[in-house]
Amino acid sequence: MAASGIGRCTWKRYNNHAIVASHFFKNLISLKHRRCSGGNTGHSIEECLFDLCKRRHFISGDNLTKTSLLQGFHSLGPLGKELKKNLVTQWWNSIVLYREEVLAIDTLYHIPLQAHASKNPLVTICSESWKSHLQGKDCTQDKPVPLLENTIRQNGVLREDLLYGALQQYVSCLDLMNKKLPFGLAEIGKCFNPIPDKNVGKKVSSIGEQTLASLTWFSSAKTASQWRDYWLRHRLQWWQKFAQSPSSFSTSDHQDDQGRKVSEIQYRFPWGKEPIESLCSKDDSTLLQMHPGNNTQLHGRDGRKSVIPYVLWVSGNLERGLLAYLSDALQLSETSRQTKDLRRQVLKFHPALTPFKVAVDMVKGPAMELRLVCQGMASELRENGISVWPGYSETSHVPLEKLFTRYDEMGILFTALVSESTLENGLLQLRNRDTTLKETMHVSKVRHFLEQYITAAKNL
């Protein structure tokens, strides 16, 4: 494409990419049940997923298994952290940012012991605080238990969910909303998951960590069932919005220990369905138990009526959600005939979730000059909120085919290749992860193109 034709073709080119994006996100055929090939011949899709997550630093850990991942015994690498950040942002925007009736809160990690009287406090208590008491001078053989119990009362237990904090702040937030119903309280925070020892009754063997996203919704009894249907539909559609295979997300219902209906949003992993978010309906007794005594402070206005609201609690596990989107994004696609592998592994994340939107790299040429161009373009993109992978900082030369394979496995949406042509006339090549097509574009148009492409994909 000639440099003079770039301005006239910009809008046409954007429309073509928007059409490609729409076709891709709506009609992509899932390949989850195929076997891996190439370097992972004979491995299941589950093994390929874990290998890719570790090799590309999405998830850290020597021995990744579905049990360790689901129970929260793993850390996130750089790409996993970016993916989670994008997932948190999209959840927050959907629940809080665009809604005037939802308030954001931030509660303590520790909750009073009486709130979790049925739990085992000796395991969930912060170990260092009671350990110091047990090693103190006042701790004798006759007094270790009283000292330990006193420490537990002072520190409380580590929270396992975010419901307690929301219920605790209900009264003050009701006043802030001028006592008008319905409204909700939203929070994202770290919680702790005690794992029971299968061999020793109720004893807890270990504690996993999980990041929960919680919405506690308060409405009148009259409208509670309508709101429940609304939020269940909203949450399922939200999870499906960013998926390559939306049908992998589904819902199921069951009853909790108290006979209340609980709905779960599940994802179909290679090994089976796992819950990633739950919706639980509770009556007004939930608030009455949290705030005993004078219940007039609990009354909110539903039209002209003054009522104690029912509670709907939505709680999602973001680590499981992250793992679901990793599994959903893994595709086995055709590669060039020039390569030995029949298929390539690529993480086809939704543009809103992909950890890095573009990788800026360079081909052979005057290294110093090309690197300066790359740095300038990367700085401009970052200043405008577009995440960039600095491939140009790599000192050793990598063949383009291997470079594209690396970026595909990292889920990077576009690769911008700066060359000597960029120095001469400002033109570079922009490669699309999903189509593998390369397009010639002026360096000054890249930011505008990426912004429009990502916006178009978000609105599908």
Image: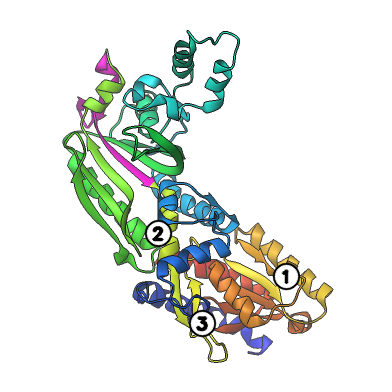
Left or right, 248 with reference to 147: left
Disc 1 packing (10 Å; few <14; some 14–19; many ≥20): many
Residue at image coords 48%, 85%: 342
Query: What number is the disc on residue 324?
Result: 2
Query: What number is the disc on residue 392?
Result: 1
Left or right, 437 with reference to 187: right
Q: Does 413 sit above or below residue 150?
A: below
> Residue 246 sits in which quadrant?
bottom left
Single out the mark in the foreground, 3 or 2. Answer: 2
Q: Position of residue 78 (x, y in %)?
A: 60, 56
Q: Type of residue at label 2?
A: Ala
On whether residue 295 falls in the magenta region, the answer is yes
Q: Which residues are magenta?
A: 294-316
Q: Position of residue 166 (x, y in %)?
A: 37, 31
Q: Does 343 sit above or below residue 75?
A: below
Q: Type of residue at label 1?
A: Tyr
Report which residue position mark 3 lands on: 12
Residue at image coords 54%, 84%: 437
Q: Type of residue at label 3?
A: Lys
Q: Does 45 sit above or below residue 4?
A: above
Q: In the depicted view, which residue is nearer to us: 441 or 330?
A: 330
The quadrant the N terminus occupies is bottom right
* SS category of the residue bearing label 2: helix
Q: Tag 3 or tag 1, which sits nearer the N-term?
A: 3
Q: Tag 1 or tag 2, which sits nearer the N-term?
A: 2
